[in-house]
Amino acid sequence: MDKKIEKQFAARAVELGKSGDAAVVDELLKLSNCSAFHVKRLAVSALGKLAGKVDSEKVVPVLLARVRDSNAQVRQYAIKSLAAYGADCVSALHDLRDIADNPSEKDYNRRDAKQAVEIIEEAIRIRKEKIIKHCQKCNVVIDSDEYSRSMKAFQRPYCDKCFDEAYLRRRNYDTEVELNKEIRANDGTLVQSAGELKIADWLTARKIKYRYDERIRIIDGYAIRPDFYLPEFDVYIEYWGMDTIDYKIGMLKKLKLYQLQGKKLISLYPEDKNNLDIILKSKLSKYIQLT
Ligand SMILES: [Zn+2]
């Protein structure tokens, strides 16, 4: 597909997801079938954002098909989006359990599938057994749709009103990051910069498992979003790539959080890019034995 058209479709998918408008669902369903996986991924993700507003009978089967997509990242977003449809996803449980148990599936997809199964099962219980759940912020009683939508997005139960407030704050940031992930690393992960690409490929070449740009809760109430997390060694890698004041303030806050929590953190900077092999090796060898 032509790069320029692909870009337009990608931006359109994000915009439609942001609109929160049920009327755009057909256009999104169409985009979720696009030949460019980047567009497909964003459309599938946007469909997850419309959960609770659109006819799930229309959307869930499409997401379910994308859960079997040949591209691992399309599968990932389909799995996550399904979780948002909660109790309406009974038909997806079987496939999601298969993915969670499949040793040849990517670790992140197995983990997300497991999480989705838990959210969907709990949402079904809330609906069927009339289990009372409360919003973690304002304490009103929430229904199964509110439960699954907020658990998918925030890993905690919020009522729709608190969800929208929290969501608005995060949405703009997330959208920007997702759109910027355009560089494809050797293992297929989409990253944001040449520096991150080098780090990803370096780790892949050494068969070191990593999770990229994933929200990790380090203590209750605090979430960080490390550039790279090495689950086998519990080591974090941050590539401090930008040079604006806002960015630096954020960086100091983040550094402090790592420090307070006693986390193993490796900081890399743009000037390290050309000597990455030596620098990353020496910094990592503090925490893990490299062969
Ligand atoms: Zn609330």
Image: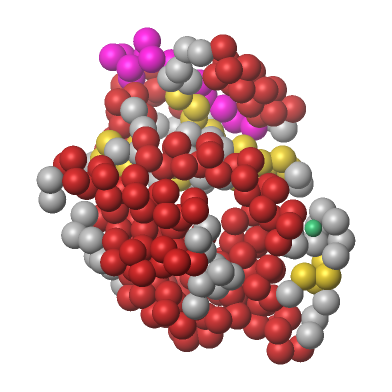
269 drawn magenta: yes
In this picture, residue 76 sits left or right of residue 147: left
Q: 105 or 46, which lies in front?
A: 46
Which quadrant of the render holds ligand 1?
bottom right
Colour setup of the view: secondary structure
Horizontal and vertical percent for residue 130? Answer: 79, 85
At x 69%, y 68%, the residue is 147
Instruction: For residue 1, say whether it is visible.
Output: yes
Q: 203 or 216, which lies in front?
A: 216
Q: Classify residue 245 by image quadrant.
A: top right
Q: 273 or 205, which lies in front?
A: 273
User: What is the magenta range?
Assistant: 263-276
Horizontal and vertical percent for residue 64? Answer: 39, 76
Horizontal and vertical percent for residue 87? Answer: 60, 80
In this picture, residue 272 sits left or right of residue 87: left
Q: Is residue 138 above or below residue 116?
A: above
Q: Is residue 113 above or below residue 154?
A: below
Q: Is residue 202 above or below residue 154?
A: above
Q: Is residue 241 above or below residue 52?
A: above
At x 53%, y 39%, the residue is 172
At x 51%, y 13%, the residue is 244
Q: How many marks?
A: 0
Horizontal and vertical percent for residue 208? Answer: 38, 42
Q: Residue furthest front?
A: 23
User: Looking at the figure, which quarter contains the C terminus?
Assistant: top left
